[in-house]
Amino acid sequence: MRLIFIYMNKFEALGLGEAIIKAVNEMGFETPSEVQEKAIPILLDEDTDIVALAQTGTGKTAAFGFPLIEKIDSDSRITQGLILSPTRELCLQITNELKNYSKFIKGLRTVAVYGGASIHDQAKEIKRGAQIIVATPGRMQDMINRKMVDISNIGYCVLDEADEMLNMGFYEDINAILSHTPDDKSTWLFSATMPREVSTIAKRFMHNPVEITVGHKNTGSENVSHEYYVVNSRDRYAALKRLSDANPDIFSVIFCRTKRDTQKVAESLIEDGYNAAALHGDLSQNQRDLVMKSFRNRQIQMLVATDVAARGIDVNDITHVINYQLPDEIETYTHRSGRTGRAGKNGVSMVIVSKSELRKIKTVERIIKKKFEEKEIPSGEEICQVQLFHLANDIAKAEINHEIETYLPSINEVLKDFSKEELIKKFFSVEFSRFHNYYKNAKDLNAAGDNRRDSGGRDGSTRYFINVGEKDGFDWMTLKDFLKETLGLGRDAVSRVDVKESFSFFNTDSEHQDNILSIFEDFRLEGRKVNVEISKDSGRNRGGRKRRDNAGGGFKGKRRSDGFKPKGRNRRDNDSGGDRGGNGRRDRRKRSDRR
C-alpha cells in the first residue's frame, strides 16, 4: 500500500483530480514523463496557448488529455474540446486513451471523427452529446461544410502531431477549421519537430504561447542508436534480408518512399518466407485494420510502410526501424526513428544507402544532433553464427513440455547409439546446415570505393566474436567503451561493434590480434569467463575487393530443391536478389504515389 501511495502522489503533485488519479492507478502508470511533468501543471493552472515539442512515444496524449478532461464540464452536452490528429489510426488511439482516462467521470463523452466510416453515424454520435471531438482534418472540414458539427463554442483546441498534419498537406484544412473556432479559445500545439509551417500556424492562431521543449528541437530519442549501411543500389533488397537474418527477433517497421516500392518490397519478403505485410494508401480501410491488428499481435515481424500510412502507428516494443530509402524531407527521419526506442526501451534505426546518398547522412546527423555509426552488411558466416547461437538460447530458455515423456522411451531407443556430443552436433546441424548451404559463397554486399566515410583501415582489420551481449547489459556503445578500456586502445581502434542477445562482434586493426587474444585468454567479467575468438570470415578484404560474378549464392532464376525454410522463411531466390523493391530506377513518380 505504501508503494501505491507514493505512485499516486507523483501524479497528484501535478494537480490532477481524484477521478483521473483513480484511472491512472488502474492503468498502471508509474511515473509522469518529462513532457507530462512540464505541460500538465501549466495547462491545469492557466488558460493559455502552448507549444510543446517532444518526440513520438513520450506520453504527449496524456500531457494534453489529462488537463483537457479536467477542464471539461461533463454536465454540459456542448462540444468544448477539439483534437485534430493526422491519421485515422492516431485519431482512434487518442479517443480510446481519453475514454480510459475519463472512465470515472460520469457523462463525459469523446467521439472520433475520421474518414473511411459513415459520416452520418458520426454526426449522430456528436448530436447525442460529445464534449470532446477527436478528428482528422479532412473529415472535420467535410462535417463543418455540411453543418453537421458546431465548434463555435469550444474552449480548447489541440493540434497533435502538428508537423505530421502539415507534411500531409492539411495546412488549408487546419486554417479553415480554426477559422470556425472562437478567438479566445486556448490552443495547444504538440509536435515532434518545429518546421517553418508549424511556426506559421503558431504565429497566426496563437497568442503568446508558452513553449515547452523536451530534449532539443528536431532531435531524435536518446534511446535510439543510428546506423547506416552502404551498398550498391542493386543489392538493397538483399541487404534488407541479411539485416533481418542477422537479427532473428526483429520486430520492425521498414520505410519506403513510395506506395509502389512498399508493395513490391513487402511482396518479395512474403515470397521469400518472411512474416511481412505492406501498409500504404492504396489499401482499403478494412485491409489497413487487418494489417495493423496482425502487426500489434506480432503475427507480422516486418511491416513495410510509406511515411503517410505509418503516421499514427503506436505499437510497443518495435526493435528496429529500417530506412530502405531515406525520406525526401529530412525531418521525416525523426518521425521514422521515433517508432522505436519508446517507453524507456532501446531501439535501432538502420539506413540502407548507396554511395551517392552518403551526403544525406551528414545532413540528418546535423538536424537530429545524433551521430550515425557506419556498419557493414553481415557476411553469410556471421549470419550462420547468429542463427546458431540464437537457436541455442531458445533451447536454453524453452519450458519443458512434460507430455513428451510418453514418447521418450521410443526416442531414446532411436538415439541410444549416439553420445551427448554427437546428439548436440546432429541437432544443431539441422538448422545450421540450411543456413550454411544457403549463404555458402554469398558475396560481400558492402559497397567498395573511396566515397565511403571513414573507410580507411578496414582492409587490415580482424573481426572477433565475444560471448557477451544484451543480456549482460551491453549495447554497442557500452561494449565499445568496455573494449577500449579493457584493451587499452585508442578512441577509434574498435569498430563495427554488433551486439546480439548473448554474444557480439567487433573489429580492430590486425596488428592488435595477438595482444587481444592474450588479454582475453583468462578474462572474467563478474565471475563469468569471457571468451574472444577470431570470426571465421575476418580475413576477407572488405574495403575494396572486386566481386566475383558467381558469388551470389548460386540459386538465381530457379527455386531451391532443398526446401530451405529457416524460422518460417523459404528462400527461393539468389541472396544478392537485385533491388526487387524497385529502387534501382530513377524515381519520377507523382507525389500521389508517396502514400
Image (cartoon, rainbow, N blue to C red):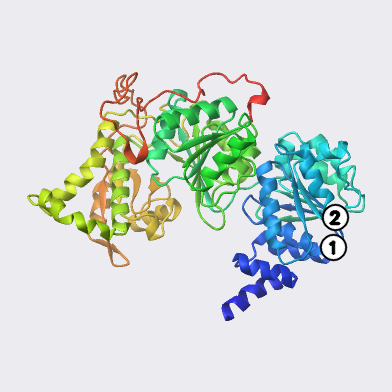
Disc 1 target residue: 73
Residue 107: x %, y % from top left: 79, 62
Q: Is residue 461 above or below residue 94?
A: above
**How many residues crowd mark 1 within 10 Å: few (<14), some (14–19), many (20+)?**
some
Q: Which mark is residue 413?
A: none
Q: Percent position (x, y) of residue 156? A: 84, 54
Q: Where is residue 548 in the image (x, y as percent from the top left)?
A: 30, 21
Q: In which quarter of the image is the C terminus?
A: top right
Residue type, label 1: Asp
Residue 521 shows in this picture: no
Q: Is residue 87 visible?
A: yes
Left or right, 505 with reference to 14: left
Q: Is residue 126 above or below residue 44?
A: above
Which type of secondary structure does the marked residue at label 1 adopt?
A: loop
Quarter where residue 106 is shown: bottom right
Q: Which of 328 and 486 is in front in this view?
A: 328
List the single residue furthest toward the bottom: 2
Label 2: how many Cα within 10 Å (few below 14, some 14–19, many 20+)? many
- What separation in Å lies between label 2 and label 1 (alpha carbons)? 8 Å
Q: Tell me the number on the disc at residue 80.
A: 2
Residue at 62 percent across and 43 percent down: it is 335
Dot 2 or dot 1: first in sequence order is 1
Amino acid marked by disc 2: Gln
Left-right relation of 57 to 145: left
Disc 2 + disc 1, Cβ < 8 Å: yes
Residue 35: image location, x then y, percent: 68, 59
- Which residue occupies the foreground of this view, 51 or 104? 104
Q: Is mark 2 on a helix, strand or loop?
A: loop
- The quadrant the N terminus occupies is bottom right
Describe residue 182's horizontal placement relative to residue 400 as left or right.
right
Between 214 and 582, the one lying in front of the other is 582
